[in-house]
Amino acid sequence: MNEVSIIGLDLAKNVFQAHGARADGSVVFRRKLSRAQLLTFLSHHQPCVVAMEACASAHHWGRAIGDLGHEIRLIPPAYVRANGHETRLGDPLFRTMCHRARVSELDPTCISS
């Protein structure tokens, strides 16, 4: 069963990293996507939680991805990097982001309009 329950996105200028995980945390996919590919890729997935680090462009992408039916969770930067895993485009960043999106006591950032 390849049901993705959460997708962690690392936003950048041109190339985004997507990490899909099941509810138990096991990895379903890891993909490198261009700006043009992102919305098409996410439209092919069932609605799920999409977590990304709160930054200026995260609000734009959050609105666009939310229009596809996904639940958006913007994680404050202090919580994404809290474990000290600053590896560039590495699994620890995505594991931390997906874990933080699941934590119920974490108050995610609201998407601004």
Image: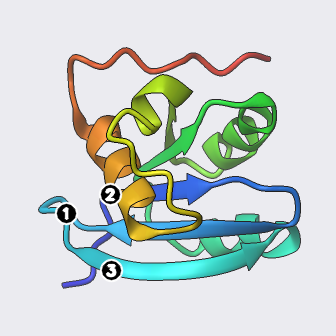
Q: Are there few (<14), some (14-19), or many (20+) residues within 10 Å of tag 2? A: many
Q: Are there few (<14), some (14-19), or many (20+) residues within 10 Å of tag 1? A: some
**Considering the numbered disc 1 on the image, is that residue within a helix, a strand or a loop?**
loop
Amino acid at circle 3 = Val
Q: Quarter-wise, where is residue 58 in the image? A: top right
Please report whichever mark, 1 or 2, sits nearer to the chain's N-terminal start. Answer: 1
Amino acid at circle 2 = Arg
Instruction: Identify which residue, 34 or 70, lies in the foreground.
Output: 34
For mark 3, what is the residue?
28
Instruction: Identify which residue, 79 or 46, lies in the foreground.
Output: 79
For mark 1, what is the residue?
25
Q: CA distance from mark 3 to mark 1?
A: 9 Å
Q: Considering only vertical position in the picture, is 15 above or below 92?
A: below
For mark 2, what is the residue?
95
Between disc 1 and disc 2, the foreground one is 2
Q: CA distance from mark 3 to mark 2?
A: 12 Å
- The disc placed on residue 2 is none
Location of residue 85 in the rendering, given as x and y in whole percent from the top left corner: 40, 51
Location of residue 51 in the rendering, given as x and y in whole percent from the top left corner: 48, 44
- Asked if the residue under mark 2 is in contact with the one under mark 1, i.e. CB atoms within 8 Å, the reply is yes
- Asked if the residue under mark 2 is in contact with the one under mark 3, i.e. CB atoms within 8 Å, the reply is no
Residue 104 shown left or right of residue 106 in the figure: left
Amino acid at circle 1 = Gly
Residue 1 shown left or right of residue 59 in the figure: left
Q: Considering only vertical position in the picture, is 30 above or below 89?
A: below
Q: CA distance from mark 1 to mark 2?
A: 8 Å
